[in-house]
Amino acid sequence: MESNDGDNILLNLTTEQPYSVAIIKKTKSRQSDSTKKPRHVKLTQGSAKCKNVHKNKVSEDANSEKFQVISSLFRKNPKLPDISSAVIQSEDKKEDGTFSGSEFRNMNLAPFMISNLEKNLHLKKMTSVQKASLPSLLSGKDVFIKSPTGTGKTLAYVIPVVQSLQDILPKIQRIDGPYCLILVPTRELASQTLTVIQQVLKPFIWIVPGCVTGGEKRKSEKARLRKGVNILVATPGRLVDHLKTTQCLTMAQLKWLILDEADRLLDLGFEQDISFILSTIKEHTSRKVQKVLLSATLSRGVENLLDVSMENPVTIDLTKEGNSEREQVEYQTPSLLEQFCVVVPMKLRLVTLAAFLQRKYLKNCKIIVFFTTQDSVDFHFVLYSSTLTTVEGDKLKFLKLHGKLSQHERTEVFSNFKDSDQGILLCTDVAARGLDLPSVNWIVQYNPPVSSTDYVHRVGRTARIGMSGQALLFLLPTEVPYLNILSEQNLRLNELKMNDILTAFVRSHCGKKKTSEEYLHSLVTEQHMKFEENVLQNKSLKQLALTAFRSFIGAYNTFPSSIKHVFHPRNLHLGHLAKSFALRETPSEMKQKLSFKEGRMQVDEGKVKRSRKVSEHSSKFAVAEPSKKKLKRR
């Protein structure tokens, strides 16, 4: 805290005492006795090296001097637990069952369709899900497809839809309106699905596709619908809006209804919108509408949706066999996916992630890093973009993606990362479902997901359609029991050692094959000190760090009760958590800056100040109204 003369401050990262720290003294213009050895190191701008970490005590003149107490990265960390062999993945080589031996030309498809698939899309062989589903879909049956992510489910329904529409004589016209309606949960998946449809439709130019999603201008969408769209891709909320307000939109000609990522549609709360859409379709047309429902998992909500929307559906389940009990769900991940976990103490998380990203970036990798909150994405994006460089001094290419970005920004980021050969995408779960991002080498889950379903969808962004890929899950020592929860769902991970990641990072920067533990600690500490100095010198970055710190605690409180014993706020060491966001303030000082006591008046030197009111997950502040109670005179 700062004293009255504004000259003294003592910053500590933990309430534990005693504590091993490096104490750095800052004085304004104080002359010391040259005959005495200084007890502290003088802090100069840019001093990032902390090669020697000593045990020092705060001097008796702490009330008249200005101190910074900087905790050591490698002291007072909890012991890393051993991971049971029961939750570790076997080393047996997996066979890739994504592709079947059958080719598209063996199916009853139009010659122009087969030619387009082979010459333009470079697709000859069908995936297993396409081989299993195409006959039923081409024969007009309702189909439920349960298959792992990245197995070609989109083409499995797009090809039959286009085949059936190009067969209609006389040829359909765009003014007829939608013949096919495809519902998807997110804007990015809608855009991606539309791109696939446009590629398949190249030989059939009279069939017009279109897309309506939230975030786009309603006026331009209405104009597009007025001209006519035959295959309509939509998010449920925006489609309901148009069904209520756009008179030219009718479902009288509808032949196909497809619900892609059905489990995600329900998770996002679109159940009422889907019910409204189903009832509207029944009102607009009396003909039978062929329905297709796709999901990577079979939850209770998906079962209810099947019962309500489909008649005697053909079920195509390509997940692991032998699961007779529906209550005990087993999840299936891509067959060529290697899954890893790394246990990292809280204080070392920031620098360990940085070391991993720098090392993989040098190998020309495309990496997606998942965070729980938007605030964490913003903080790590700004910090890493401004601090991390290659050995040659070039900055790493970082992109960010979350729900706060405008639709234009999200589309631009998605397109840039998709077209690039190298890069790092920091994102929330907005990118976890359905998106087909080619050639992603690594998926890093910096914060564990709240459910096994979310875990499966996150890692499903790599190892897609016959390609190999790797996934890494960061865990705190107290979070290791989460591996038991994953193993119950047939999800087993290999262990990476934190020291191996840090050692590889140090060797790539110094060029030495062998490094001592002391040298490794000094370089890792130096890197972390750069992060801390960047935060100290940049007020806006410091505010991002404080907000991300708060939102991390808020998100930790949202884990379901079934896994609360693993992810409980009581397990968090707030001082170490502050260190993981490159902050040097104590938790009590951050509590004052973030004004957790909502609406309380603060009096400072006779001036009344309004405290800022902070909601649990929002980073926006609202000013609390002053109390209207009159003070009693004494």
Image (tube, rainbow, N blue to C red):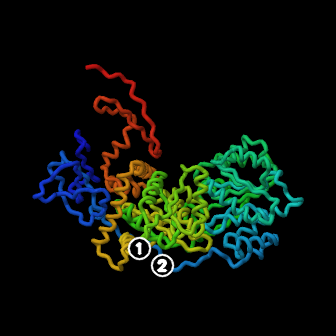
Assess whether mark 1 and mark 2 are in contact (beta carbons under 8 angstroms).
no
Q: Residue furthest left?
A: 35
Q: Circle 2: is it few (<14), some (14-19), or many (20+) Cα within 10 Å?
A: few
Q: Residue furthest right?
A: 170
Residue 550 placed where, x, y %? 40, 48
Where does label 1 land, which residue?
A: 85
**How much space separates mark 2 and mark 1, taking CA atoms?**
12 Å
- Identified at 50% across, 80% down, the residue is 92
Residue 537 placed where, x, y %? 36, 52
Residue 85 placed where, x, y %? 41, 73
At label 2, the amino acid type is Glu
Quadrant of the rendering where the C terminus is positioned: top left
Horizontal side, residue 401 vs residue 597: left or right: right
Q: Nearer the viewer, residue 568 or 502?
A: 502
Horizontal side, residue 418 vs residue 498: left or right: right
Horizontal side, residue 530 vs residue 375: left or right: left
Element type where label 1 sits in the image: helix
Above or below for 271 versus 47: above
Residue 209 placed where, x, y %? 75, 57
Horizontal side, residue 165 vs residue 294: left or right: right
- Identified at 38% across, 43% down, the residue is 594
At label 1, the amino acid type is Ser
Q: Nearer the viewer, residue 172 or 523?
A: 523
Compare marks 2 and 1 and give the one earlier in the sequence.
1
Quadrant of the rendering where the N terminus is positioned: top left
> Which label number is shown at residue 91?
2
Q: Nearer the viewer, residue 507 or 538?
A: 538
Above or below for 292 versus 132: above
Question: Viewer-nearest of labels 2 and 1?
Answer: 2
Q: Nearer the viewer, residue 442 or 284?
A: 442
